[in-house]
Image (cartoon, grey):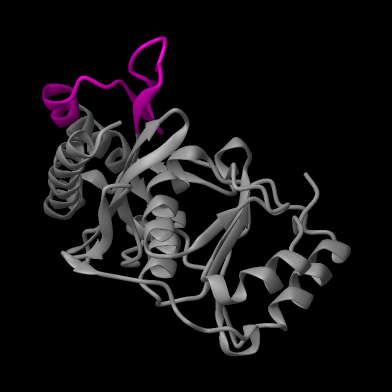
C-alpha cells in the first residue's frame, strides 16, 4: 500500500475514532446498559452502538471491508486489506466509570497493520501511527522509554478470560512480578500498548488476546520504537494470542524469561 493511501486512510480513522469517542461520552447514561455478562466478561449497549458509528462512517468513506469485534465481518471475504475495529476496549472500566478505555481502529494489509488509531476519549488523547508517519499523541511525536533494567521498569499485563488459577501458575506469575519495580493491570489492551508507545510504561505482555484488541496499539508502539513478538520471539505476533510489546532495552531480558503464565 502506498504512502499517500495510508495517510488518507489514517485521517479517516482518526475522524471515525473521535466520532465514536464523543458518542460514548455524550450518551453514556443510555449506553451504559448491560446486554451480556458472565463471570469474566461484560458487553454493553455502548459496544454495539459505538461500533455502528464507526462502521457507518468508514463504510461511507472507504472501500475496504471491516472486521469488528461485535458484529464480525462486514463481507464474506475480507481480502488483503481490511479494517479492524474495537469500538470500546475496556468495557468493564467504562461501565464502572474507571477512565481507562478507548476506541481502537487499525487497517490491515497482507495481515500486517499499516496504521492504527487509539482514542482515549476520557482524556481526549489521540494516539496514532502508521508505516508512513510518526507515532504521535495529539500530533506530537512519541517514543518508547529508555529503561534498561527490569528492576526499574513498569510491566503491564492482564489475566486472560480462560485463566488457570492453579497454585503452580500463580507462583510463576508472581515470580515474574518480582523482577519489576511496579506491575499494573489496567483492563484495556489497546491503552496498554499506547502506554508503551508513549514511554509511560516499559513492557506490555499478555496471553489470550484477539486481533481487534491489539492491532492498532501494537502498530503505534512499533512505530514509536517498540519491539513486538510472540512469547517465542516470532515477529508474526498476529498469528497467535500472546505477545510481548517492549521498549528495546529490556526486550532481550523479557524474552529470556517469558512464557505463557497459564495453561489453557
Instruction: Tell whether 211 sits left or right of 229.
Output: left
Which of the 4 quarters of the picture holds residue 87? Answer: top left
Q: In the displayed image of the protein, which residue is found farthest to the front?
A: 2
Q: Is residue 77 above or below residue 144?
A: above
Q: In the displayed image of the protein, which residue is found farthest to the right?
A: 168
**Rendered residue at 74%/63% (across/down):** 258
- Residue 253 position, x and y percent, is 70, 73
Q: Is residue 117 magenta?
A: no
Viewer-nearest residue: 133 or 57? 133
Say if residue 34 shows up in the picture.
no
Q: How many marks?
A: 0
**Rendered residue at 81%/69% (across/down):** 172
Quarter containing the C terminus: top right
Instruction: Tell whether 161 sits left or right of 144.
Output: right
Q: Is residue 79 magenta?
A: yes
Magenta region: which residues? 56-83
Q: In the displayed image of the protein, which residue is found farthest to the top?
A: 76
- Residue 202 position, x and y percent, is 51, 75
Viewer-nearest residue: 149 or 92? 149
**Rendered residue at 72%/83% (across/down):** 178
Q: Is residue 104 above or below residue 134?
A: above
Say if residue 37 shows up in the picture.
yes
- Residue 91 position, x and y percent, is 39, 51
- Residue 27 position, x and y percent, is 14, 48
Quarter containing the N terminus: top left
Instruction: Tell whether 96 sits left or right of 57.
Output: right
Which of the 4 quarters of the picture holds residue 3? Answer: top left
**Rendered residue at 43%/65% (across/down):** 225
Which of the 4 quarters of the picture holds residue 119? Answer: bottom left
Amino acid at each position: 500500500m502506498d504512502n499517500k493511501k495510508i495517510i488518507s486512510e489514517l485521517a479517516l480513522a482518526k475522524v471515525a475514532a473521535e466520532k465514536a469517542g464523543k458518542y460514548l461520552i455524550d450518551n453514556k447514561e443510555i449506553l451504559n446498559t448491560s446486554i451480556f455478562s458472565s463471570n469474566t466478561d461484560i458487553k454493553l449497549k455502548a459496544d454495539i452502538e459505538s461500533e455502528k458509528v464507526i462502521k457507518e462512517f468508514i463504510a461511507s468513506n472507504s472501500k475496504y471491508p471491516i472486521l469488528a469485534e461485535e458484529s464480525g465481518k462486514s463481507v464474506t471475504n475480507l481480502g488483503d486489506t481490511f479494517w479492524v475495529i474495537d469500538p470500546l476496549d475496556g468495557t468493564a472500566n467504562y461501565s464502572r466509570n474507571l477512565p481507562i478505555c478507548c476506541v481502537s481502529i487499525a487497517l490491515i494489509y497482507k495481515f500486517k497493520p499499516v496504521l492504527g488509531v487509539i482514542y482515549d476519549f476520557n482524556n481526549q488523547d489521540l494516539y496514532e501511527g502508521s508505516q508512513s508517519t510518526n507515532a504521535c499523541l495529539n500530533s506530537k511525536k512519541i517514543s518508547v522509554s529508555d529503561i534498561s533494567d527490569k528492576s526499574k521498569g513498569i510491566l503491564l499485563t492482564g489475566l486472560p478470560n480462560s485463566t488457570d488459577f492453579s497454585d503452580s501458575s500463580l507462583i510463576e506469575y508472581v515470580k515474574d512480578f518480582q523482577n519489576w519495580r511496579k506491575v499494573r493491570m489496567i483492563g484495556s489492551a489497546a491503552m496498554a500498548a499506547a502506554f508503551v508507545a508513549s514511554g509511560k510504561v516499559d513492557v506490555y505482555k499478555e496471553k489470550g488476546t484477539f486481533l481487534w484488541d491489539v492491532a492498532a496499539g501494537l502498530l503505534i508502539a512499533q512505530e514509536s520504537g517498540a519491539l513486538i513478538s510472540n512469547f517465542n520471539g516470532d515477529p508474526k505476533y498476529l498469528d497467535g494470542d500472546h505477545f510481548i510489546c517492549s521498549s528495546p532495552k529490556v526486550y532481550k531480558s523479557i524474552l529470556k524469561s517469558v512464557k505463557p503464565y497459564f495453561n489453557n
